[in-house]
Image (spheres, rainbow, N blue to C red):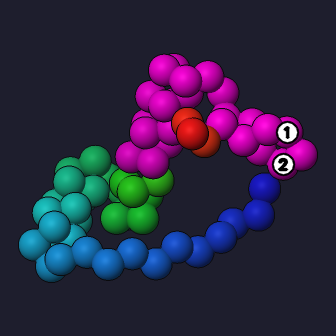
Amino acid sequence: MSMKSLSIRIDSDMLDKLHVVADYEARSANGQILILIRECIEKYEERHGKIELGNEKKNTGA
């Protein structure tokens, strides 16, 4: 699995709060964001089925 980079815009208050939560969980802000993204994907797949990637059909919800 290759690692990619993603840039987001976030207001300073939200970023500061993210750092507080991440510190509490003993994670970096990046690590905390990855946990949240994984949880989001898991919830989506529970409701809509596994997301197929690559040559397989992508589940876009459309």
Helix, strand or loop at mark 1: loop
Q: How many marks?
A: 2
The answer to whether residue 52 of the structure is visible from this angle is yes
Which quadrant would the N terminus be assigned to in this image? Answer: bottom right
Residue 50 within the segment the image draws in magenta: yes
Q: Picture coordinates of residue 60 (x, y %)? A: 60, 42
Which quadrant would the C terminus be assigned to in this image? Answer: top right
Query: Foreground: 56 or 1?
Result: 56
The residue depicted at 43 percent of the width and 39 percent of the height is: 40
Q: Which residue is mark 1?
A: 56
Type of amino acid under label 2: Gly
Type of amino acid under label 1: Glu
Q: Picture coordinates of residue 49 (x, y %)? A: 61, 22
The answer to whether residue 35 of the structure is visible from this angle is no
Quarter occupied by residue 39: top left
The residue depicted at 69 percent of the width and 66 percent of the height is: 3
Above or below residue 29? Residue 38 is above
Q: Which residue is mark 2?
A: 54
Residue 12 within the segment the image draws in magenta: no
Query: Foreground: 42 or 34?
Result: 42
Quarter occupied by residue 17: bottom left
The circle on residue 17 is none
How many other residues sit within 10 Å of disc 2, few (<14), some (14-19) or many (≥20)? few
Magenta extent: 36-59
The residue depicted at 22 percent of the width and 62 percent of the height is: 18
For this orientation, the residue located farthest to the right is 55
Describe residue 17's horizontal placement relative to residue 22 as left or right. left
Quarter occupied by residue 45: top right
Helix, strand or loop at mark 2: loop
Q: Picture coordinates of residue 52 (x, y %)? A: 75, 36
CB under 8 Å between discs 1 and 2: yes
